Image (cartoon, coloured by chain):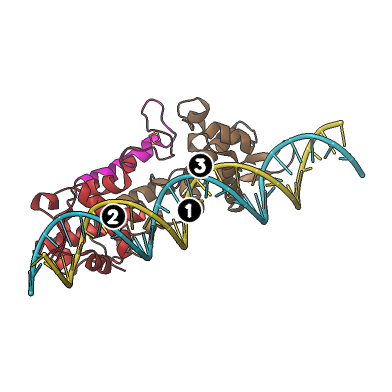
Chain colours: A brown, B red, C yellow, D cyan
Amino acid sequence: MGMFSKSCEYALRAVFYIASNTLKGERVGIKQIAENINSPEAFLGKILQQLTRAGIVQSMKGPNGGFFMLPEQLKRPLADVVAVVDGNQIFVGCGLGLTYCSETNPCPLHNEFKKVRNELSYMLHNTQIGEFNEQLLTGKSTLNK
Amino acid sequence: MGMFSKSCEYALRAVFYIASNTLKGERVGIKQIAENINSPEAFLGKILQQLTRAGIVQSMKGPNGGFFMLPEQLKRPLADVVAVVDGNQIFVGCGLGLTYCSETNPCPLHNEFKKVRNELSYMLHNTQIGEFNEQLLTGKSTLNK
DNA sequence: ATAATAAAAGATAAAAATATCTTTTATTAT
DNA sequence: ATAATAAAAGATATTTTTATCTTTTATTAT
Ligand code: FES
Ligand code: FES
């Protein structure tokens, strides 16, 4: 597996897709999202439930329902999405899997690992969900295949 | 989960332990390793099999048998251990889980993610397994709890 | 040679992650 | 009010990862 769980990858792709459609003023349904980010529909539904409960995205039931985001939600960092789906071990956990990362009783890789972990953490905390809307809408970047 | 699979975490802790004991001129058995890196014994056995087949460590059966490393094996990078256990997706894979990472058809996070991924890759390629032997033997760093 | 030791190999089990299917609830349009 | 739509919730299934158990093979000491 990669840096994130599969659920988390779907989650990130989904919020990017929802964000860019929100910019166009459109709500999007699970089916449409799943098609556009290349994910299993029902499984994505479960992930979107989590994201909705956590206040990462908004949802509406019924005709013309679907998922969308509020302006302030577009500004939230990717770290929030990752934390909701994968927890915060990626931000604070020991690289060698010790029960917790410690300065006073570190694993051998601590100093080296911490640097990388902090780079990732910084990047995710300083990147906003809505930041890629334009490049997505103009097709400069993609969410499927 | 963290950056690596649990198997990979055990693998890294195990090679560090074997390396530091090799420096002391000692072979170590699965049981001893498992106790000292706090891992399930039988499961660790399977992982050590992989590492032996891949030439990361040496093994000897029978009395006074156990695991140890050759001088050149002590110099190999952590990246080799990670690649054997987790594959190379962590080094080359797309952060959002697209089938492959591409410069020409990138995901939105590509540039930001690539930086972090390359930092991790660089670190793992430029850190040797045997590099922490001294601090491990002097108790300055730990592999359990 | 024989017994003891320890890893290798193979088989099986349990837990977690991923995926699907069915029923219920909220919302909208008629 | 009724029917249609779409997400929420709940139940179930599949796959992968993690873990354990048993048998075999190699090595050493007696
Ligand atoms: S103790 Fe392992 S990364 Fe800090
Ligand atoms: S395409 Fe996603 S990280 Fe390169």
User: Which amino acid, by three-letter code, is at mark 1?
Assistant: Ala
Q: Residues within 10 Å of mark 3 (few under 14, many from 20)?
A: many
Q: Position of residue B78 (x, y in %)?
A: 22, 49
Image quadrant of residue A36? top right
Q: Residues within 10 Å of mark 1 (few under 14, many from 20)?
A: some
User: Which amino acid, by three-letter code, is at mark 3?
Assistant: Tyr
Residue B122 sits inside the magenta stretch: yes
Q: In which chain is the residue bearing label 3?
A: A
Helix or strand or loop: what does disc 2 sit on? helix
Helix or strand or loop: what does disc 1 sit on? helix
Where ligand 1 lies, by quadrant? bottom left
Q: Which residue is mark 3?
A: A10
Q: Are marks 2 and 1 in contact (CB under 8 Å)?
A: no
Image quadrant of residue A42? top right
Q: Are marks 1 and 3 in contact (CB under 8 Å)?
A: no
Q: Above or below — where is B112 with respect to C11?
A: above
Q: How many marks?
A: 3
Q: Which residue is mark 2?
A: B47
Residue shown at the point (49%, 31%) measured from the top left: A144
Residue shown at the point (50%, 25%) measured from the top left: A138
